[in-house]
Image: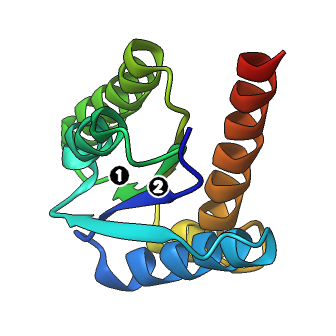
């Protein structure tokens, strides 16, 4: 099993993407993992496919999926959020490679900023920590 990790980043909200990525990279570095590859995609909806490519490559112990969806005036938000979450879950269940859902789903930009390393939480860091934890569990069960 690989010790490398992947991060797929939806870049629709560039500033939020950078904040989420910084949090994730900080968590990986603090855990001693410097072999982390970052893959950019246009937005959150593309994250499951990027996660699938990374997971199926056999090169990564886990994939942190990062992005943001901010509610607008239409139902588009609901579809993107639901399908992105379903897609990320489907990838990890089909491949066995842990994939964390580090996608902000917020009503406002202020909420997103607070959850991307602001005063409420750092969803990028949390996604990396989740991938690290689940990949450790996977390795433990595979060796036992």
Alpha carbons under labels 1 and 2: distance apart: 5 Å
* Residue at image mark 1: 71
Vertical side of 15 occupied by 39: above or below? above
- For label 2, the crowd category at 10 Å Cα-Cα, with few meaning under 14, some 14 to 19 and many 20 or more, is few
SS assignment at label 2? loop
Q: Which percent across, then down, holds residue 103? A: 47, 51
Query: 9 or 35, which is in the foreground?
Result: 35
Query: Mark 1 near mark 2, Cβ–Cβ under 8 Å?
Result: yes
Q: Residue 79's quadrant in the figure?
A: top left
Residue 101 appears anywhere in the view:
no
Q: Residue 100's quadrant in the figure?
A: top right
* Residue at image mark 2: 107
Q: Which percent across, then down, holds residue 15? A: 38, 85
Q: Which percent across, then down, holds residue 89? A: 45, 23
Query: 25 or 47, which is in the foreground?
Result: 25
46 displayed left or right of 59:
left
58 displayed left or right of 72:
right
Vertical side of 131 occupied by 75: above or below? above
Q: Residue at x 63, y 76 (%)?
A: 23
Residue 120 appears anywhere in the view:
yes
Which mark is on residue 59? none
Vertical side of 58 occupied by 73: above or below? below
Query: 89 or 77, which is in the foreground?
Result: 89
Which quadrant of the figure contains the N terminus? top right
- For label 1, the crowd category at 10 Å Cα-Cα, with few meaning under 14, some 14 to 19 and many 20 or more, is some
Q: Residue at x 52, y 72 (%)?
A: 20
Which quadrant of the figure contains the C terminus? top right
SS assignment at label 1? loop
Q: Residue at x 22, y 69 (%)?
A: 12
Q: Which mark is first along the chain, 2 or 1?
A: 1
20 displayed left or right of 78:
right
Q: Which percent across, then down, holds residue 56? A: 29, 32
């Amino acid at each position: 099993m690989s010790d490398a990790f992947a991060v797929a980043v939806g870049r629709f909200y560039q500033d939020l993407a950078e904040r989420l990525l910084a949090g994730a990279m900080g968590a990986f570095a603090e855990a001693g993992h410097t072999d982390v590859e970052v893959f950019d995609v246009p937005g959150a909806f593309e994250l499951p496919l990027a996660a699938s490519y990374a997971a199926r490559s056999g090169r990564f112990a886990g994939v942190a999926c990062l992005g943001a969806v901010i509610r607008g005036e239409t139902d588009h938000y609901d579809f993107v959020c639901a399908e992105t979450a379903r897609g990320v879950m489907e990838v990890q269940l089909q491949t066995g490679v842990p994939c964390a859902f580090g996608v902000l789903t917020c009503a406002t930009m202020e909420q997103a900023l607070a959850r991307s390393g602001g005063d409420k939480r750092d969803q990028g860091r949390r996604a990396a920590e989740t991938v690290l934890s689940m990949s450790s569990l996977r390795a433990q069960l595979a060796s036992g």
